Amino acid sequence: MGISDMKWISLVVLILGFLNTCRTETIDNTRALTSDLIANYSRVIKPKRNQSEPVEVSIGLQLLSIFEFDEVQEKLSIMAVTYLIWKDELMTWDPKDYGGAEVVYFESHQVWTPMLVLINTVNNIKKLGYDDDWLLVRYFNNGSAYFYPGGVLSAKCDVDVTYFPWDKHKCRFQFSTWGSDPNIMKITSMSDELFLDYYSPNGAWDLISTEVTSRYKNSLFEMYITLSRKPRFVVVNVISPIVLMALISTIVFYIPVDSGERISYSMTMLLAIAVFLTLIGDNLPKTSNPMSIFSYYLLSMLILNIVILIINILSVKCYFIGDKQPVSSCWASWSRCIKCKRRNNRKRRYVASRDANTLHKTNTSDSKHHQVRSSSSTTYSYSTEIMISHVNGRQAVKDSNPNMKYQMTKADAARCRDKSAGGVDTDIDVEDDSVTWEDVSVAIDILALIVSILAILILTSVFFFIIWMGGTKNS
């Protein structure tokens, strides 16, 4: 075969290929195809030539977003698209007979679609795509059918708020064939997980994992979604105010009893804790199994504030008893103990202050004496005697110069001696073992303040430790 023959053969092939590409699908071809396919077609008949064989339906779920998670109603709503793929043996054709048409579309209400329902829905049970007649089913010439119904899916979810607000939830979506057995339709999964190609994160929940399984001879399709709460909002807006209010409620023991505001202050803090308890209770599921540990924590804080209020009332009552009745030995013994403790603390502060003042005055006197000696050698011709005293916070200089006069009263001299001893009243060493009801009130305030602060810190630490242990265990 010569070169000229090869050229002619190549030219013929190119012309035939061009003519083949010019053969396009027209509107008449599509109308003829749809009319031929839909003729004698019944959407209630299984699309199999052999009616004894089941239709194999592949299912997948494209998760778009977490629409809503209502812990009170125990409901999870997601925005998702369901992928359904099967083979319809009644929807096959030869593209050559219809202008090369390989794809055709029918509305979902015109053709057979899988009878799949979400059986654990919180709404009315409906077939997937039942309300969406405008959705199209795409068919290829080999009979492959693709149907993508989408929307909001709401399912019942067993909520476990034991470790609120560090709680995790595993919710399940169950799809099953409605009114049919495995001989009619068989469900297979496209993947072991949900598709997350177009997923938009949620502001309140983190998506931890997804899982897909099938049961009962592939007639039940289950999808699991594991969510974890983002605790920052609850910590900042709920837990922190509770802890701070509980700590502020202990300041009531610093308020003077004579002010008359102590009981009203305690009542205000108690009501604030009770309001927070009500708000949290409205946002938790109404179930007793399991109960949230945070509910017990709030209850403990409420009881603690009630105890603080009762102790506050007792302290006010003791303060205003006066001399009407003597202090009982029981009250006097531990009140005297706290009183002695306070006296010892004052003594230690007094000694430390006295030593500091003595050291400061010694350095100051040496400096002053040095300055006077240097100035007397050049300015004065007579001897000068310097005495530095502290009288009512002022320095008074007395010398032997008869022209300089300074009168010091006995009271000033007494104050000078007291100040020179350390700057603190010396009556601190006076022992007074008598106990009044006012001393009992002060002792109650001191003891209640220490115990209440320790109780709040211990309760909060135990709460966070249990939550941390539980979260670590679940993860």
Image: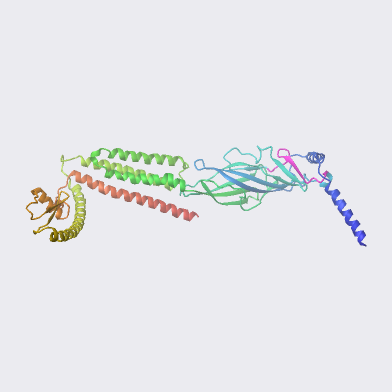
Residue 93 in the image: state x and y as whole percent. 80, 46
Q: Is residue 99 magenta?
A: yes
Residue 7, compared with residue 68, is above or below; it is below
Pick the quarter of the image with the N terminus: bottom right
Q: Is residue 115 magenta?
A: no
The answer to whether residue 164 of the structure is visible from this angle is: no
Q: Residue at x 10, y 55 (%)?
A: 399
The answer to whether residue 378 of the structure is visible from this angle is: yes
Horizontal side of residue 238 vs 382, given as left or right: right
Horizontal side of residue 178 vs 255, given as left or right: right
| Camera-side residue of 3 and 87 | 3
Residue 326 in the image: state x and y as whole percent. 15, 43
Span shown in magenta = 98-114
| Camera-side residue of 421 and 141 | 421
Residue 32 in the image: state x and y as whole percent. 82, 39
Q: Main secondary structure of the magenta part?
A: loop
Residue 71 in the image: state x and y as whole percent. 50, 43
Q: Residue at x 39, y 52 (%)?
A: 462
Q: Which quadrant of the figure has residue 44?
A: top right
